[in-house]
Amino acid sequence: MENESKKYLEFIKSRRSIRNFIHSKIQRDTILQILECGQFSPSGKNNQPWRVNIVIHPTVKRMLGDLTMSGNIIESAYLNFVIFLDLEKVYDRVKDLQSIGAFMENILLGIHAMNLGGVWIGEILKNKEQVNEIFRLNTGKYELMGVIAVGEIDEEIIKLKGESPRERRPLDDFIDWY
């Protein structure tokens, strides 16, 4: 059992943000399995305050891409999960925002488990009203929380760039014992 725990902890620590993709189809079943990982995220009162629009169509990807400096990532990904907070399900804003964060991280772990790459794009939030317009969603009902771009990892570009996992702050920098 200890070996399994170590493997799982290493799996979590090996997840990284991927911004370079090979255009390769991702099967519907795979997409649904990834979203199931998010579905099992914790939420207060089990309210599950999320909504996801799955964007595969090139025109819609371009429209989203035009709203962020990460547009090339959105357009090169096979698909994008556009994630909203369903304001009609909110019962405590802080708790629900935390639930959305857990939902998005579970999706990223699901992407990693499927040997795909993904990156959480938050910079698009500066144009959240325009994103709602693309999908004809009422801003009083849905609030954009971010986009997760998903695709097959372009290992060649990663090798060329010499990308390595980002350094993490030492634990002692942000913990105190009482």
Image: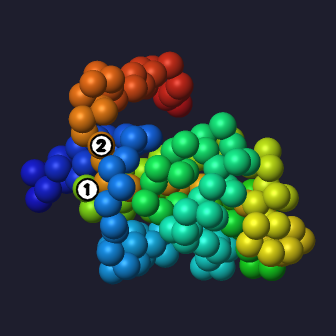
Q: Nearer the viewer, residue 170 or 175?
A: 170
Chain-order first, disc 2 or disc 1 = 1
Question: What residue do we see at 69% from left, 66% from top?
Answer: 84
Residue 100 x/y as whole percent: 62, 61
Q: Nearer the viewer, residue 39 or 22?
A: 22
Give the image's coloring scheme.
Answer: rainbow
Which residue is identified by label 1? Answer: 115
- In this rendering, position of residue 61 left or right of residue 133: left
Q: Is residue 54 above or below residue 166?
A: below
The amino acid type of the residue labelled 2 equals: Asp
Identify the element where label 2 is drawn.
loop
Question: What residue do we see at 47% from left, 50% from top?
Answer: 76
Question: What label does residue 154 carry, if any?
Answer: 2
Look at the image and tell me whether residue 108 can be seen.
Answer: no
Q: Which quadrant holds residue 164? A: top left
Residue 40 x/y as whole percent: 46, 74
- In this rendering, position of residue 122 left or right of residue 172: right
Identify the element where label 1 is drawn.
loop
Q: CA distance from mark 2 to mark 1?
A: 12 Å
The local crowd at label 1, few if under 14, some if 14 to 19, many if 20 or more residues have their Cα within 10 Å, is few
The amino acid type of the residue labelled 1 equals: Asn
Question: What residue do we see at 31% from left, 54% from top?
Answer: 152
Q: Is residue 156 above or below residue 115?
A: above
Q: Nearer the viewer, residue 100 or 68?
A: 68
The local crowd at label 2, few if under 14, some if 14 to 19, many if 20 or more residues have their Cα within 10 Å, is some
Residue 110 x/y as whole percent: 36, 62
Question: What residue do we see at 33% from left, 23% from top?
Answer: 161
Determine whether label 2 and label 1 are within 8 Å by CB.
Answer: no
Question: What label does residue 80 carry, if any?
Answer: none
State the quadrant of the N terminus: bottom left
Q: Is residue 40 above or below residue 159?
A: below
